[in-house]
Structure formats: C-alpha cells, structure tokens
Image: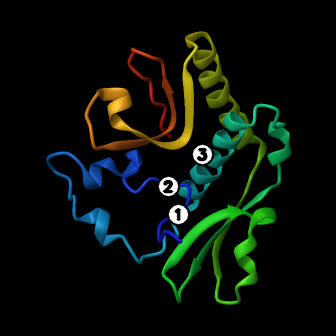
Amino acid sequence: MDKLSGYHARKPPSSAPRWGGREGCTASINAQDGYPRSGNGASRTGTCGHQMCAEMLLHPDTDPQSYLGMEMVFWVHPESDCSGEDWRGRFSIMADPCVEIIATHTVDQELIDLCMVHVEYVREREAPMGATMYVENSTPRDVSSRTPYQSTTSQVKSVQPGRATWPSST
C-alpha cells in the first residue's frame, strides 16, 4: 500500500508553493514519505469534498444527499508507515488491530452544496465538448501537452482529440 493517501497526488497542486517554482523545495516530496498526513479540519473537509466530487462525476446517478452525515475516517498504520482515508462504511482496513484512527470528518449540507457547484460546472463543460473525461486519474502528459515521459494528475481532465485540455483541480 502506498505511504501516501489513496486520494492525493504525490505533488498536489495545493502544495505547489512548497515543492515547485523558484522558491520551492523539490526534496520535500520525498521527505514527506513515512509521515502520516493528519492534516487539519480544513484539509479534512477538502479531502471529503474532493472524494465526493470524484464519486459523483464517476457515478452520475449518485444522490448528493446520500452523503449527508457520512463520516470519512483518516487513519495510520504505524507498523507499515501507511496512512490514508476512506468512508467509514467502506473502511475494510479496520480489521487490522494495528490501524489507528487519527481523525474523522462528517459531511454536512454546506459541503454537499459546494460539491454540487463543482460537479455541475464540470458536467456543463464536459458534455458539449464530446471529450473523454478522466476523474482522479493520472494521465500521460503527452496527451495534453505533447511532452513525453511525464504524467499529470488532476481531479478532472477532459481530453478532446486534437485539442487542449482543461484540468480542474481542488
């Protein structure tokens, strides 16, 4: 299992000021390995919203209200340096007695409303383009920028044959 959370890019856009650009520290990417990502209240809210948006985009029949009251569990496994998060109802790793829950976050109506704004925005732009939508997927960068041997991860990427892409990151 990956040491980093299953829902997060190794170089997330939200951390670009830390690892990228002139002032960034590229070594910070490897330095974070082995440390649990417990985050804070805002980051846990963002992680829940990010996951909800991805699921609703992948499964258009999902009722957004079904998320109300759902709880996301943030965990670490100290013996293997693994950490991650998942919805409590899907949290199969709990069978392991070494797993420690470090935080939880419960979905409220405000988060559902914010996610629906994002999901509707993506759907409104993706449908008329006749493009292929990639959700929470690492795609070869040469698909979008013609730069070989690299990949990029964004929450949503729409690829239209012969045209540029419009990534949407949270």
Residue 63 location (% of width, % of height): 84, 37
Q: Which residue is mark 1?
A: 5
Q: Residue at x 52, y 76 (%)?
A: 82
Where residue 151 sits in the image (x, y, percent)?
36, 43
What is the tally of numbered marks visible in this picture? Answer: 3
Which three-letter amino acid code belongs to the residue tagged 3? His
Q: Are marks 2 and 1 in contact (CB under 8 Å)?
A: yes
Picture disc at residue 8: 2
Circle 2 sits in a helix, a strand or a loop, which is it?
A: loop
Q: Is residue 154 above or below residue 125?
A: below
Q: Nearer the viewer, mark 1 or mark 3?
A: 1
What element does badge 1 sit on?
A: loop
Using the numbered discs, state the Cα–Cα distance from disc 1 to disc 3 in whole angstroms. 13 Å
**CA–CA distance in space, label 3 to label 2:** 9 Å
Q: Nearer the viewer, residue 60 or 101?
A: 60
Amino acid type shown at disc 2: His
Disc 3 to disc 2: CB gap under 8 Å:
no
N-terminal-most mark, 1 or 3 = 1
Q: According to the image, label 3 marks what residue? A: 50
Q: Are marks 1 and 3 in contact (CB under 8 Å)?
A: no
Amino acid found under the numbered disc labelled 1: Ser
- Where 15 falls versus 63 (above or below)? below
- Please name whichever residue, 50 or 161, is drawn nearer the observer in this view of the structure: 161
Q: Name the quadrant containing residue 102.
A: bottom right
Image position of 26 (left or right of 9): left
Is residue 155 shown above or below 33?
above
- Which residue sits at x=28%, y=49%? 17
Write down the quadrant of residue 97 in the picture: bottom right
